Amino acid sequence: MHSTSVGSRTTPITGVGNGFNSLFQSAMPSQLQINGLEPVAAKQNMDVYVCTSTADLYQNLGITAAIAAGTTFGSFKTRIELVNEIQSSFRSVTILVVYHRITGGNSLTNAGFIRTPTDALSLYRQGGDSYVSSVSTGGFYIAALSYATYDETTFQNVKAQADADFSGWKGTLNAEFAANITNLANNTHTTSTFHQRGEGFTSPLPDRNTFMSFMNGFGSPDFQLDLPAVLDFSLQPYTNMEGCPAGFRVIDGYIDSWTGRNSIHPGASLTAIAETVLASEQLLNGVQTMYDFYGCLAAEPKLATAKAQYTKILSDLDAWLKEVDEDPTKPGIAVPTISPDDLKYPIAQYSLLSGPVGPGGGGDTFADIQLSMIGRLVRPSRVAVHSGDSVDKIDFTYSMVLGDDSDSWYVSRGGGGGDWYAAIDFGPGEVILRAGPLWWGGDGLVKSVDFVTTTQTVQLGRQGSAPYNCVWDKTDTTCLVGFAGRAGRYFDALGVQYVQFQPCKWATPPTTQGLKARSTKPAPISGLRDPGALDRDGTPVDLVISPDRLLKAFLTTNAGKVLVLYGEKGGWENWLQCELAYDLRNNFSRPGYLDREKSDVYANAPAQRCDLFLTERPVGNFTPETIVIELKAAGVRRSPTDLFNGVRDDIAKMFSPNPRINKFNPRWGRVQAFAFGAFVANDPDTVFGAYNGWGGNSTKPTLVKIGNTVDHLQLALVMWNYKNYT
């Protein structure tokens, strides 16, 4: 991001045990005595992605919003620079090919504080908020072919073609891949650019014509990673360590707000919001440039105010970051008020129209400009008329500011006669205010063409005051872009082509999922509360229960036990449900009741039971709070795919295709529903990413990895939630 003060203090990670400051994405001196390590398993993989946003690029390059916001070292800086190079003020489709090779690294299995910290602030100042629990080293090669589009129709067409040709591509980059790239590049309504980056080796990078063979050979043992780099790292908060000061919980709350590490919706983190603002600002710049080029800013007044709103959000986030860093143990530092509406980006709305055409009906029809040219900023630069008594021929010269073929071109319409010659040149910034043909009665041919601009008035062809015309006059939302008509041996009819702009469509970025308007107002009082809890901003309030945090905290504490129990016969699902129920009972005050295997929860399916049901009794004017939880766990005899199928079915039970919880039961009040799935795998990211059975009726769950890798096994949790209130 680097639009805030983030990034000014970053120090590279050197190994496991390093401290880490998540606000500034910087390594800190180690505070740990390392008592156990195990090597990271070597692996390599090549993937092809179709990306249509900055968020897509970051995600598929393994860059979180927090890293993008402030990391300025190593392979992470390399990947961020690539994204910045690809970014465009226009909607783009990027074919991203990534080859990762992990050849080394370590994972922390046992550690403790060198010295027991005396207080939370001292620990933060000396070692940050987290420690590096694993590091993977190796190298990568990334190639990106980006296609900038200049109108929504072209964007959707290119996206559809790219999805069909490249999504899920497996294996080497072969002749079919090359043919698909060529076909996509042949779309004349786009601008194609090639970008690449490499890390972990000193061999020179290829050019666009040879990148495929370079990519195919990158995984060969003959290709030497002679300068291995840190490719990935994992963090664990100090609160998981024995001896961590109690006040560190406030710090964790701020880190959660900044990075979204404990959120079911990480897109609502402050860093994700900042990245979304910057991406929206780039798109705004492109649309604003377009409306301004055609002199039609009046069609969308909001373009003038949206940029100021974006700037204010970034400024407010920067101020929040600085205040938190001053003393992150101080509770009550409220995040700025941010609404999803503040993050919307504009999509230009316009039509290509033809003005009146006259006078005659002979000759062949023509229209010089197509709709796809408008987004590339097209304009006439010269009109030359050959005439005698009538106009014989007109030469039209056009230019486009954007695109691969942005040089001037001209077309000639009409016959070959005409002894008189006259022309008008339109200078930079000159606006055509009026234009059209003139004629007298009789032969039905154009006699002359009139132009009135901001700098000149010209009549081309036969001079004099003609009794007939069909002129076009500019408004503050229209602009002349070309000409249409009929021509053969002579010029039979002429009219103008003009673009009509409308107010923009304002779209909500997909990364704002889970974001509601953040406010500095106190949270509402609830009976389901942790008596000592702090909210995400560090303010002591009565909290609505957060079972996702409670479950993650329990699994983090008991990760070692889980890795033993998951292999036992009978599984560990019931044990996990009982432990979660116990924590729900004992950590939160006065629940009305907690029930396992409760029926009569789901509309139209009263016999189906939920795993855990927790509600409070209404007291006074308090609104009741109700939590519905479905929880699955995969043992060694149950594959992650089977687990995902179970979580999918739980989601369908709660929400398919509409909310199915009996949310109108007045005794239940505000309802939240959670679907969890805990599993163990060698590579949770890969198995989660390969599953495509979630369907379209609900949000895809979020994946969170828990604890450290042990014997190449990683505990992970998928999470989904729904609530009946905003």
Image (cartoon, rainbow, N blue to C red):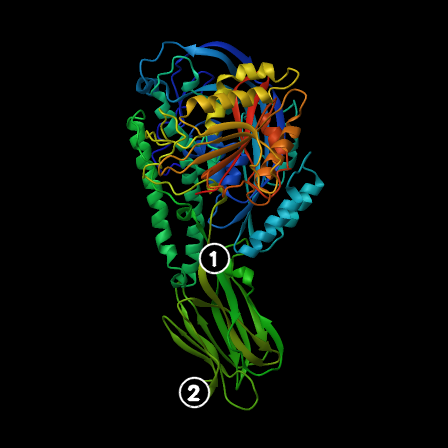
What amino acid type should be assigned to the residue bearing mark 2?
Answer: Ser
Distance (Cα) linking label 1 and label 2: 40 Å
605 sits to left or right of 338? right
What amino acid type should be assigned to the residue bearing mark 1?
Answer: Ala
Q: How far from the left and from the top, in percent, is residue 497?
A: 51, 70
Q: Residues within 10 Å of mark 2 (few under 14, many from 20)?
A: few
Decide which of 284, 516 is in the foreground and name it: 516
Where disc 1 sits, the SS reads: strand
Where disc 2 sits, the SS reads: loop
Quadrant of the rendering where the C terminus is positioned: top left
Q: Relative to residue 329, is residue 504 depicted above or below? A: below
Decide which of 386, 76 is in the foreground and name it: 76
Q: Mark 1 = which residue?
A: 348
Q: How far from the left and from the top, in percent, is residue 438?
A: 48, 83
Q: Which mark is residue 32?
A: none
- Which residue sits furthest right? 175
Q: Residues within 10 Å of mark 1 (few under 14, many from 20)?
A: many
For residue 255, what is the image quadrant?
A: top left
**Count of labels shown?**
2
Q: Mark 2 = which residue?
A: 465
Decide which of 53, 193 is in the foreground and name it: 53
For residue 432, what is the image quadrant?
A: bottom left
Sequence-wise, the earlier of marks 1 and 2 is 1
Q: How far from the left and from the top, in percent, is residue 423?
A: 46, 74
Q: How far from the left and from the top, in percent, is residue 42?
A: 61, 20
Decide which of 554, 686 is in the foreground and name it: 554
* Residue 692 visible to an observer of this rendering: yes
